[in-house]
Amino acid sequence: MRKALVYIICLTLISLGTGTLWAKDKYTVAILPFAIHSAENIDYIKQGVEEMLTARISAAEKITVIKKADVRQELQNAQIKDINSQNVLEIGKKFTADYVVWGSITKIGNSISLDGKLTNIEQAKSNLAISSQSSSLDDVIPKINDFSENIISHILGTAPPAQTAVSETSPGPSAASRESQIIAGMRSGGRKAGTLTSVINAEFINAPSPFKRQGFWMSQKIPTELKGMDIGDVNNDGANEIVLIDKNAVYIYQKTQDDLKLLETIKGPSYETYRAVDIADINRNGINEIFVTVTQDTFVKSFVLEFKDGKYEKIASGIRLFLRVIDTPSGMPLLLGQELGFGKPFDTPIYEVIWKDKAYVTDQKMQIPQGLSVYGLNIDNVGTGGGGEKILALDDLDYLYILDKTTKSLPSLTSFGFASEKIIWRSEDVYGGSNNFIENLDKNNPDDPRAKSTYINLRILTADTNNDGKKEIIIVKNLSSTARLLKQLKLFTASEIYNLEWDGLGMSENWRTKKINGYVADYAIKDVDNDGRHEIVLALVMSVGVSLRDRSVLVVYELDAPQQ
């Protein structure tokens, strides 16, 4: 009896030490986003590390890695920003995971430190860790490989293989592996080789100062805080004009070689607030209309201007819709409308708006998830495949989504545990951002849900800037000194422009601009100077505040590389 007991104890100790006895048929691993400590943006390293670990670990037959999108969604739902050992256990239990991989990446100068841990959820402790400091990214990549192999051997109870250098490329261009793509992306700083400098104005992307670039133009100061902008021929003279709005006025400018020439000012009453402006010929009479979205207290009362007999006339007013024009892949503009919601302002369906019987009326209900705003929205394929157009949208937290068309609500698509096929991709970072918010709509009922601040987000634009026959997403990220902590005043003071392209698995960053001093109120990719080529045009607010004079400028960047 004593021999049997000793035998059982020995077996137990061996099993606890090696994990090889009574092994499971399948193990589940969650890989959490690595924390970043760096003065510069190294998201491309963070994403590369996570993707390499995922690719390596999931290759093992008995190990399943939880989808990255599901992990991100749970972190968002649990409002976890700084990951620690306690919430690692909580997340692991939420997914019934056996192990959780987590850690941090630190970059100081050229030095890169990688710290990673493998936490056993059942034992509530870290069984494996890596800590390395490297002088370059090339030295980091083998460390990631070693860490992933050690993770696999620890979980499965096998001997780790001899450590070998990581191959940069697979044999032959047709056999390029996902891992080689990840490594190439990390080494290129998140940019795809061969897509930029020959086509895009490199000074637009890489110049050390935003205002010391070739192919760059900035207008004179405009003494107001701009709220919106669009570009198009609005007086039927064959040339494009620039239509700007502030709180309660419409300004129509013509760009000359040296400055902006003011053609018209159309003022509204002080009790109205202008929210957005768009240009399109929706009534199909050959003259572009100007669509201005307006709010007054608890009402939306938009209006439409059109040039007639030498002046701008209101051809429609009191339209109870938030309005937005988007350019469709067919080349035809599409006017979208959304009623003010009873709860949240944008928690209502989105409709196509048409001209019928001398009025703008809602037509077909769009296959766009309810819960999205008509602002921060576009419809395009952007190379995702699968046939048909996709919904490109920013949610109310400024995360970027690519979705298949659906009438299901956004909350139902993103609820935990619901693996919706309609969500093609969701960003890990925020984009957009706006100081243009609807505040306290019902002053008599401050506790009404509609009284909470809701933001008129920026556009999402698409364009084929690298001439590969596939559109990319061009999107602005406004940067806040308060890190978006304040609900009613986000204090955006700087901005960046991003180019995102579908790489087969998600949207990857082709390029971004250097930081631009100023908050982008609106932007467009249109021919602003009537030279037959499109430019990126920013309505840039340089300063806003009680003690400072509101001051805005129009900034124009040539996309083409400057001629030498």
Image: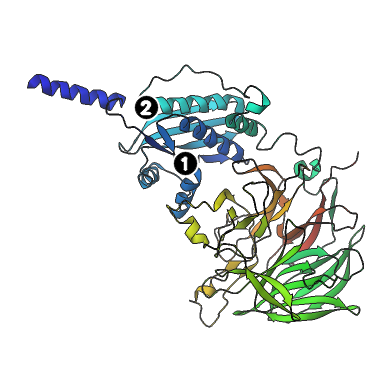
Badge 2: residue crowd in 10 Å (few <14, some 14–19, many ≥20) = many
Q: Dot 1, how many residues are within 10 Å of its Cα: few (below 14), some (14-19), or many (20+)?
A: many
Residue 144 drawn at (x, y percent): 52, 28
Please state if 201 lies on the left or on the right of 22 as rendered: right
Tag of residue 437: none
Disc 2 or 1, which lies upstream in sequence?
1
Looking at the image, the residue that sits furthest to the left is 1
Left or right: residue 188 compared with residue 425: right
Answer above or below: position of 365 versus 197. below
Above or below for 314 versus 210: below
Q: Does 122 sit above or below residue 61?
A: below
- Provide residue 554's location: percent of width, then percent of height: 80, 59
| Callout 1 secondary element | loop
Residue 223 visible in image: no
Amino acid carrying mark 2 in the image = Leu
Label 2 vs label 1, nearer the camera: 2
On-image quarter of the N terminus:
top left
- Residue 30 in sight: yes
Say whether residue 329 is left or right of residue 259.
left
Distance CA(mark 2)–CA(mark 1): 20 Å
Which residue lies at the image location 25% right of the left edge and 23% below the top edge? Answer: 14
In this view, the residue in front, 427 or 33, is 427
Marking on residue 156: 2
Residue 32, disc: 1
Going by the image, does 271 lie left or right of 8?
A: right
Residue at 77% over, 75% down: 249
